[in-house]
């Protein structure tokens, strides 16, 4: 990963930053919508690694990754954001309205539910203390600024013990396991009043 010298700039291929926060002792975290054409390379490098097997795109080539995120970009109910730390890309955050997603067939969606998917990128160097916790806290704080979002829903692969444990440390509670296309998932829920930065 390289530092983005045009940090904060907007071009036709690089959407504007939608949220930015300076986290003391960690760095400046920002996010912007994924630009499918220009971001496909970094996203493919992440999703094609074994460590990202639960993302379900191990066999996808760069063109397929671009197609997937061009489709997501066309939706009004699903959103993908590339997250940067001090100007370098470090994570992919996606959010969605559960009632417009296959997960709605597996649990009773409540008013104010908002779904998320999180992929932490491949570290380019030493991982800073609290890396995943800071990024997750940043994302949740951003989402919960909207008072209509009463509960955050995530559905990591049921075999992904590390991801589930990370959600629980952030204040999520376990729901049932469900069958989704391509995976058995563990539902976890975060009521907005239970959000805590960690």
Image (cartoon, rainbow, N blue to C red):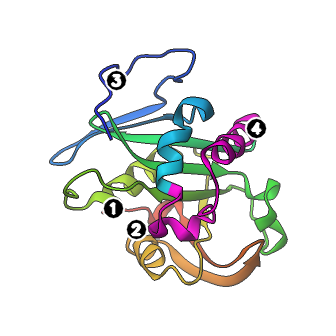
Crowding at mark 2 (Cα within 10 Å: few <14, some 14-19, many 20+): some
Residue 144 appears in the picture as rendered: no
| Marked residue nearer the N-terminal end (4 or 3) | 3
Q: Which marked residue is nearer to the observer: mark 1 or mark 3?
A: 3
Q: Secondary structure at mark 2?
A: loop
Residue 173 appears in the picture as rendered: yes
- Whole-number angstrom distance, CA of label 4 to CA of label 1: 28 Å
Q: Which residue is mark 3?
A: 7
Taking the spot 59% from the left edge, 57% from the top edge, the residue there is 116
Residue 185, percent from left and from top: 65, 78
Taking the spot 68% from the left edge, 55% from the top edge, the residue there is 112
Judging depth in this view, the residue of 11 and 187 nearest the camera is 11
- CB within 8 Å, label 1 to label 2: yes
Q: Is residue 110 above or below residue 71?
A: below
Q: Is residue 32 above or below residue 150?
A: above
Q: Which marked residue is nearer to the observer: mark 4 or mark 2?
A: 4
Where does the C terminus fall, quadrant-wise? Answer: bottom left
> Image check: 158 left or right of 67?
left
- CB within 8 Å, label 4 to label 1: no
Q: Which residue is mark 2?
A: 170
Residue 76 has which mark?
4
| Marked residue nearer the N-terminal end (1 or 3) | 3
> Image check: 133 left or right of 80?
left
Where does the N terminus fall, quadrant-wise? Answer: top left
| Marked residue nearer the N-terminal end (2 or 3) | 3
Q: Secondary structure at mark 4?
A: loop
- Whole-number angstrom distance, CA of label 4 to CA of label 3: 26 Å
Q: Which residue is mark 1?
A: 133
- Look at the image and give the residue range highlighted in magenta: 47-75
Q: Secondary structure at mark 1?
A: helix
């Amino acid at each position: 990963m390289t530092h983005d010298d045009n940090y904060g700039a907007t071009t036709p291929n690089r959407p504007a930053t939608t949220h930015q926060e300076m986290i003391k002792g960690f760095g400046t975290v920002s996010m912007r919508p994924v630009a499918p054409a220009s971001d496909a390379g970094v996203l493919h490098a992440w999703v094609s690694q074994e460590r990202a097997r639960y993302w379900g795109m191990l066999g996808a080539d760069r063109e397929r990754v671009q197609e997937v995120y061009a489709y997501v970009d066309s939706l009004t109910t699903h959103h993908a954001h590339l997250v940067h730390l001090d100007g370098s890309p470090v994570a992919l955050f996606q959010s969605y309205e559960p009632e417009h997603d296959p997960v709605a067939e597996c649990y009773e969606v409540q008013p104010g539910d908002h779904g998320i998917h999180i992929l932490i990128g491949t570290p380019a160097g030493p991982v800073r203390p609290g890396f995943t916790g800071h990024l997750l806290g940043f994302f949740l704080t951003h989402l919960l600024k909207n008072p209509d979002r009463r509960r955050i829903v995530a559905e990591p692969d049921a075999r992904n013990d590390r991801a589930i444990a990370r959600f629980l440390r952030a204040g999520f509670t376990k729901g049932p396991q469900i069958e989704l296309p391509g995976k058995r998932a563990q539902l976890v829920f975060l009521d907005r009043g239970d959000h805590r930065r960690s």
